[in-house]
Amino acid sequence: MFDSGSGPPLVVIPGLHGRWEWSEPVLCSLSASCRTISYSLCGDLGSKHPLERDLGFDNYVRQLDAVLDEARVARAALCGVSFGGYVALHYAALRPDRVSALVLASAPGPGWRPTTQQARWLSRPWLSAPAFVLTSPARLWPELCCALPDWRDRVRFFLGQALRCAVAPMIPGLMASRMHCAAAIDFEADCRRVRAATLVLTGEEKLDRVVPVASTRAYADLISGAEYRMLRNTGHMGLLTQPGTFAEIVAGFVHAHHQ
C-alpha cells in the first residue's frame, strides 16, 4: 500500500494490471499536494485482500472500504485509472458519503466492449500473455514518441517502467477475471447515482490505443455536472508519460472540491 503526503486525501485505484507500483512516479507527484493513497487490487501479490469468487465486483467495493478504514479516512477523493475507473465510479454510486470528488482517467465507458484482439487476450489470458507483452512496445510507440520527443527520455521511461513491472508482475488470469466481473455491472445506472464533483480525463483520441476517448468521454454527459479535460500529446498512459501534468490537474481538482 502507498500512503504518502499531506493535504486532502486522494485514493488512486490502479488499472487492470492491479498493481500500485506501476504508477509510483505519479503517486509521488500527487503526494506533493495531497495525502495520496494507493493499493494493489484484491487477489494480487502484495494485496492484503483475497479475491472471493462468489462476491464478483463487490470484492473491489469491500476492499476500498477496508483501505479507507485502514488509512483512517472517512471521506476521500477517488481517482480511478482505466479499469480502476469502474471501481471508483461504482463505489461513488454506492458510498456517496465517503467520496468527496471523483476522477475517471481513461476509464472504459458504459457499454464499452473489447476489440477482437482484446477479447482474444481475455479469453486465453495465460496463453496470450507472451504475445501481449512482446507487442506492447509497438502498440505504445506512437504515444511515447509524442509524449517524450527526446529518445533519451523514452529510454529512461522504458527502463524505469520495465523495472517496476518486473518487481510487481501482473497476473493475466486475474486481469481477465476483473473484466468478466465488470461486465455484470450497470455502470450507466451508476452514473445517475453519483453526487460527487466529477472530472473526466483522457489523452488524445489518436494516441489512446486501449480505450477509445469517446467511450471515456461519455461519462462527462452521463454524470451530472461532470467536467472534461484532455491531456495533450499522450494517450492511455498519460499518468505515466506525463506524471507532473497529470498530478497538477488531478490535485487541483481535488483541492477545489475538498471540504
Image: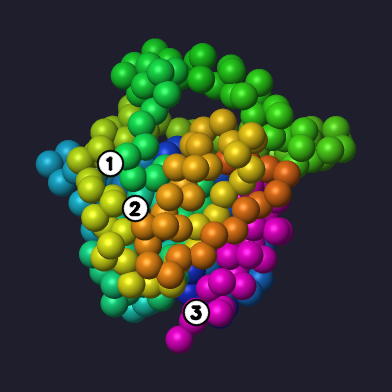
Which mark sits nearer the N-terminus, 3 or 2? 2
Q: Which mark is residue 182?
A: 1
Near mark 1 (Cα within 10 A), the count class, few <14, some 14-19 or many ≥20, is: some
Q: Which mark is residue 88?
A: none
Q: Distance from label 1 to label 3 (Cα)?
A: 28 Å
23 magenta-colored: no
Do tag 3 and tag 2 residues touch (Cβ < 8 Å)? no
The residues colored magenta run: 238-259
| Quadrant occupied by the N terminus | bottom left
Looking at the image, which residue is at 28% across and 62% down? 192
Q: Would residue 65 be seen by someone viewing this image from the given angle?
A: no
Q: Would residue 122 be seen by someone viewing this image from the given angle?
A: yes
- What's under tag 3, amino acid-wise? His
Near mark 3 (Cα within 10 A), the count class, few <14, some 14-19 or many ≥20, is: some
Residue 177 on image: x %, y %: 28, 33
Q: Residue furthest front?
A: 221
Question: Does residue 74 appear left or right of residue 144 in this picture?
Answer: left
254 magenta-colored: yes
Residue 241 on image: x %, y %: 69, 45
Residue 71 on image: x %, y %: 39, 71
Q: Main secondary structure of the magenta part?
A: helix
Q: Which residue is mark 3?
A: 257
| Quadrant occupied by the C terminus | bottom left
Q: Which residue is mark 2?
A: 87
- What's under tag 1, amino acid-wise? Ala
Residue 190 on image: x %, y %: 27, 57
Looking at the image, which residue is at 39% across and 28% down? 114
Q: Is residue 71 above or below residue 19?
A: below
- What's under tag 2, amino acid-wise? Val
